[in-house]
C-alpha cells in the first residue's frame, strides 16, 4: 500500500512539473513572438514616414524633370532666334543695322539692296562725323553718365560686357562685347541696347551699329542726337 502511495505521489509530481514547465515555455514564446503595442505603433509610424519620404522624393524628381524640360525649351528658342538673325545676314558684308524700319521683299524675305546701300552710306557718314566732331562738355558728359548708369542698372550685362561710351557734340559711341561670338549675337545685342534706350529719355535718338566684322568680338552702337534737341 505504501509503495502505491509513493508511486502515485511521484507521478503527481511529474505531471505538475510537466505542466509548469510547459506553461512557462508557452509564456516565454508568447512574450517573444508578440510585439508590444508601443512597438507596433513605432513600426506603423516608420512605415508611414517611409511612404511620405518616397512620395516627397518622387515629387522632387518630377519637379526637376519639369525644370530641365523648360530649360531645354528655352535653349531651343534662343538657338532658333540666333539662327533666324544669322540667316538674315547671310551676306557677311552687311555689318550694320538701323533703328529705322527696313523694307523687305515679301517673296524672298531678303533685305532690299537699295535699302542696304542706304544704311551702309548712313553708317559710314555717321562714323566719319563722329570722328571729326569735337567734344561739347555741356552735353557729352551728362549723356555719357546717363547711358552708363542705364546699362549698369538694366539686364543688358547678363548677355554682354560694357566697354565704355564716348560722346562728342551730337553723337555717342557705345562699345560692347556680346558674351557669345557670332554675327547673330551681335545683332541681338544691338537690338537689346536700342530697346533699352527706347525706355529712357533718349528714346528719340537714332541708333546704328558697326558690327566690326566676324573676327572681332567687340561692336559699336552709335547714337545720334535729334536735330530738335540741338
Image: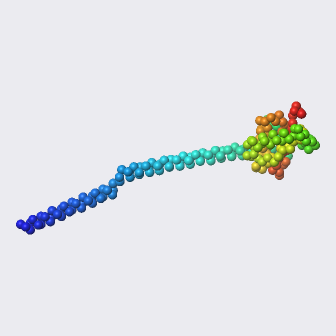
Q: Is residue 96 in view?
A: no
Q: Residue furthest top?
A: 228
**Residue 1's x, y, as percent?**
6, 66
Q: Residue furthest front?
A: 138
At a point 82% along the width and 46% down the height, the residue shown is: 164
At a point 27% along the width and 58% down the height, the residue shown is: 26
At a point 72% along the width and 46% down the height, the residue shown is: 79
Q: Is residue 161 left or right of residue 20?
A: right
Q: Is residue 124 left or right of residue 64?
A: right
Q: Residue furthest left?
A: 1
Residue 205 versus residue 10 in the image, above or below: above
**Residue 87's x, y, as percent?**
78, 44
Q: Is residue 60 in view?
A: yes
Q: Nearer the viewer, residue 33 or 214?
A: 33
**Residue 44's x, y, as percent?**
41, 49
Name the image quarter holding the C terminus: top right
Amino acid at each position: 500500500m505504501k509503495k502505491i502511495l509513493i508511486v502515485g505521489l511521484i507521478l503527481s509530481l511529474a505531471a505538475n512539473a510537466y505542466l509548469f514547465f510547459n506553461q512557462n515555455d508557452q509564456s516565454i514564446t508568447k512574450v517573444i513572438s508578440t510585439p508590444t503595442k508601443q512597438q507596433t505603433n513605432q513600426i506603423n509610424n516608420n512605415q508611414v514616414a517611409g511612404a511620405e519620404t518616397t512620395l516627397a522624393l518622387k515629387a522632387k524628381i518630377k519637379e526637376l524633370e519639369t525644370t530641365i524640360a523648360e530649360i531645354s525649351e528655352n535653349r531651343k528658342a534662343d538657338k532658333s532666334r540666333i539662327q533666324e538673325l544669322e540667316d538674315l545676314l547671310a551676306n557677311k558684308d552687311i555689318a550694320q543695322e538701323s533703328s529705322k524700319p527696313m523694307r523687305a521683299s515679301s517673296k524672298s524675305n531678303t533685305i532690299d539692296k537699295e535699302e542696304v546701300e542706304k544704311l551702309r552710306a548712313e553708317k559710314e557718314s555717321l562714323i566719319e562725323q563722329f570722328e571729326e566732331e569735337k567734344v561739347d562738355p555741356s552735353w557729352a558728359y551728362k549723356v555719357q553718365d546717363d547711358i552708363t548708369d542705364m546699362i549698369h542698372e538694366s539686364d543688358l550685362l547678363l548677355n554682354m560686357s560694357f566697354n565704355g561710351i564716348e560722346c562728342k557734340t551730337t553723337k555717342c559711341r557705345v562699345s560692347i562685347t556680346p558674351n557669345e561670338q557670332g554675327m547673330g549675337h551681335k545683332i541681338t545685342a544691338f537690338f537689346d541696347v536700342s530697346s533699352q534706350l527706347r525706355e529712357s529719355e533718349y528714346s528719340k535718338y537714332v541708333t546704328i551699329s558697326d558690327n566690326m566684322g566676324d573676327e572681332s568680338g567687340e561692336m559699336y552702337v552709335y547714337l545720334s542726337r535729334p536735330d530738335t534737341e540741338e
